[in-house]
Image (cartoon, rainbow, N blue to C red):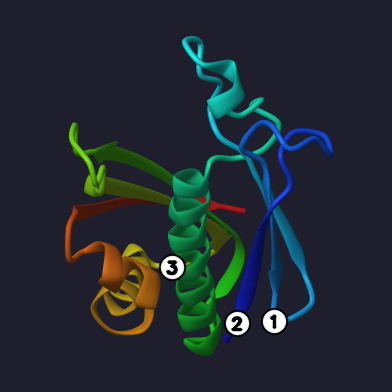
């Protein structure tokens, strides 16, 4: 796996904190920093997600992927899956994630809550590399709801 991240500045200038990531699979991802009210030239322009937001989104995508796949392999009629992540970060550098709650909403026909609970546990205990890595610094909790389609 590879990725190249390049500083773009702001709108093609060499000020600001915009970045473009080019992934080994041929996709691009844009990131930006928060504006800095004290030294605007050192801040971003709020044109894209922050790198840490992107990391959090990656963990959500990784675990949601697992949950859907596990439920489908169990022959459950899953029709939707979303996960809302709420995270807290340390106050001092490096401002790592210290707490993350992942709330899953699974929609389907007759999907048992026990199957969803098992799929989430399997993702976090075995399959989702992103949440396993983040668990080294953050307490990760999960919750879920199952909605009938």
Could you tell me which secondary element the residue under label 2 belongs to?
A: loop
Image position of 4 (left or right of 55): right
Mark earlier in primary sequence (1, 2): 2
Asked whether disc 2 touches disc 3, contact meaning CB atoms under 8 Å apart, the reply is no
Residue drawn where x is 17% and y is 58% of the image: 137
Mark earlier in primary sequence (1, 3): 1
Picture quadrant of residue 121: bottom left
Q: Against 68, is 51 above or below?
A: above
Q: Tell me the tag on residue 63.
A: 3
Picture quadrant of residue 63: bottom left
Residue 24 shows in this picture: yes
Label 2 vs label 3: CA separation? 21 Å
Of the pair 129 and 81, the residue shown nearer to us: 129
Residue drawn where x is 38% and y is 70% of the image: 130
Q: Given this view, does label 1 or label 3 mark the residue nearer the observer?
A: 1
Could you tell me which secondary element the residue under label 3 belongs to?
A: helix
Image position of 46 (left or right of 107): right
* Residue at which label 2 appears: 2
Residue 6 position, x and y percent, is 68, 58
Label 1 vs label 3: CA separation? 21 Å
Residue 65 position, x and y percent, is 53, 72
* Residue at which label 1 appears: 24
């Amino acid at each position: 796996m590879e990725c190249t991240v390049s500083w773009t500045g702001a709108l093609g200038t060499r000020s600001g904190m915009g970045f473009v990531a080019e992934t080994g699979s041929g996709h691009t991802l844009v990131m930006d920093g928060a504006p800095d009210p004290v030294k605007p030239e050192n801040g971003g322009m709020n044109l894209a997600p922050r790198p840490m937001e992107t990391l959090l989104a990656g963990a959500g995508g990784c675990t949601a992927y697992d949950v859907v796949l596990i439920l489908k392999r169990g022959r459950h009629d899953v029709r939707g899956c979303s996960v809302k992540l709420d995270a807290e970060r340390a106050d001092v550098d490096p401002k790592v994630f210290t707490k993350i709650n992942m709330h899953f909403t699974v929609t389907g026909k007759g999907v048992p809550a026990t199957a969803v609970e098992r799929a989430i546990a399997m993702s976090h205990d075995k399959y989702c590399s992103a949440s396993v890595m983040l668990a080294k610094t953050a307490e990760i909790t999960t919750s879920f709801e199952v909605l009938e389609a």
